[in-house]
């Protein structure tokens, strides 16, 4: 029997999650009925969402919640006017979003951090990333967008994608390559661990390697040799370890997950969809800005 994709996608709402276990993470709220989807269909579908929970590292820790493990992935966007905080009862804690206790320290003093936990190898993240781009563009000047790369699916080659992300971060390439990496995995397939035509995992010997990723990044101003050297450096190994430790501290077990200023978490499923994820992010940013 052919090995099928170990994730679920909602056929009606196009909501999905890539979970730590072989299957989906447990959603805080039921999603629409779900059916298995192939990588090709996921790549072409409306963005996918996920369920997840987050718990913080020790309060008062001097290690930043996202420091050295997250980065601005897009070019700076024009400043957006901050929205006033209005609590009209639409967003309910414990249903649409969840408090992180104790709250995590952040790495951008004076800024409200908005972090996506993701993997290039996650089909749900591929579906959601255009929405995340919209979130990044919608942030007011008092907020900053971060990304935390997950590795908890070694059975789908996620550690390689994580290593590639942090090497690109160290070389200041993420802003130029973030969306293109998703395309290389889920559209062209050049860096895909799946055969996009059959929806089966490729034989492990055929999985893309960091050397393959280096050839991709070599189109963006570095040599493949330089990229590989950085990818295998102590710096990147340290950033990967910090990311894994932060994932455990947050309690994240599926992707994508949104974390607001180290204090709140939600997923597109708990928010109710992609458009709602943008709105909830803006609301939580306003809530933080108002000190509520």
Image (cartoon, rainbow, N blue to C red):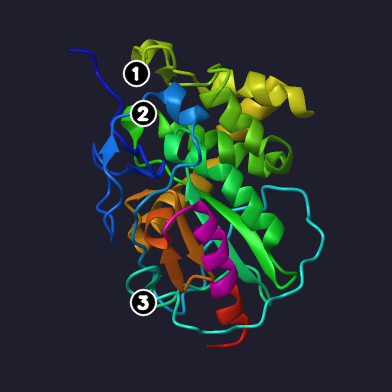
Q: Is residue 56 magenta?
A: no
Give the residue drawn at x 56%, y 43%: 129
Helix, strand or loop at mark 2:
helix
**Does 191 sit above or below residue 62?**
above
Question: Which numbered mark, 3 or 1, is in the foreground of this view?
Answer: 1
Answer with the quarter of the image where residue 269 lies. bottom left
Residue that label 2 marks? 156
Asked if one can make out residue 202 in the rendered structure from this viewpoint, the answer is yes
- The 10 Å Cα crowd at callout 1, few under 14, some 14 to 19, many 20 or more, is many
Name the residue furthest left: 1
Answer with the quarter of the image where residue 181 lies. top right
| Residues shaded magenta | 272-284
Residue that label 3 marks? 101
**Does 236 sit above or below residue 207?**
below
Name the residue furthest right: 78
Residue 236: numbered disc: none
Residue that label 1 marks? 201
Give the residue drawn at x 57%, y 80%: 288
Residue 130 position, x and y percent, is 60, 43
């Amino acid at each position: 029997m052919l090995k099928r994709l170990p994730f679920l996608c909602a056929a009606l709402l196009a909501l999905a999650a890539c979970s730590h276990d072989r299957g989906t993470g447990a959603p805080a709220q039921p999603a629409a009925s779900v059916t298995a989807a192939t990588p090709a269909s996921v790549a072409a579908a409306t963005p996918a969402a996920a369920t997840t929970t987050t718990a913080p590292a020790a309060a008062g820790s001097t290690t930043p919640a996202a420091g050295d493990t997250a980065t601005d992935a897009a070019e700076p966007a024009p400043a957006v006017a901050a929205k006033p905080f209005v609590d009209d009862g639409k967003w309910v804690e414990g249903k649409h979003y969840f408090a992180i206790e104790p709250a995590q320290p952040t790495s951008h003093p004076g800024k409200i951090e908005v972090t996506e936990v993701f993997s290039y190898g996650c089909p749900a993240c591929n579906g959601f990333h255009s929405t995340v781009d919209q979130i990044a563009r919608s942030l007011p000047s008092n907020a900053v967008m971060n990304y935390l790369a997950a590795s908890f699916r070694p059975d789908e080659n996620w550690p390689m994608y994580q290593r590639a992300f942090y090497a690109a971060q160290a070389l200041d390439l993420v802003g130029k390559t973030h969306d293109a990496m998703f395309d290389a995995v889920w559209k062209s397939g050049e860096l895909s661990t799946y055969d996009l035509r059959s929806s089966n995992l490729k034989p492990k010997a055929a999985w893309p390697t960091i050397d393959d990723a280096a050839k991709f990044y070599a189109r963006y101003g570095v040599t493949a040799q330089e990229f590989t050297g950085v990818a295998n450096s102590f710096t990147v190994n340290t950033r990967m370890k910090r990311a894994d430790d932060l994932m455990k501290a947050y309690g994240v077990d599926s992707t994508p997950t949104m974390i607001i200023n180290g204090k709140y978490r939600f997923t597109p499923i708990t928010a109710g969809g992609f458009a709602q994820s943008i709105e909830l992010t803006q609301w939580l940013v306003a809530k933080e800005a108002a000190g509520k």
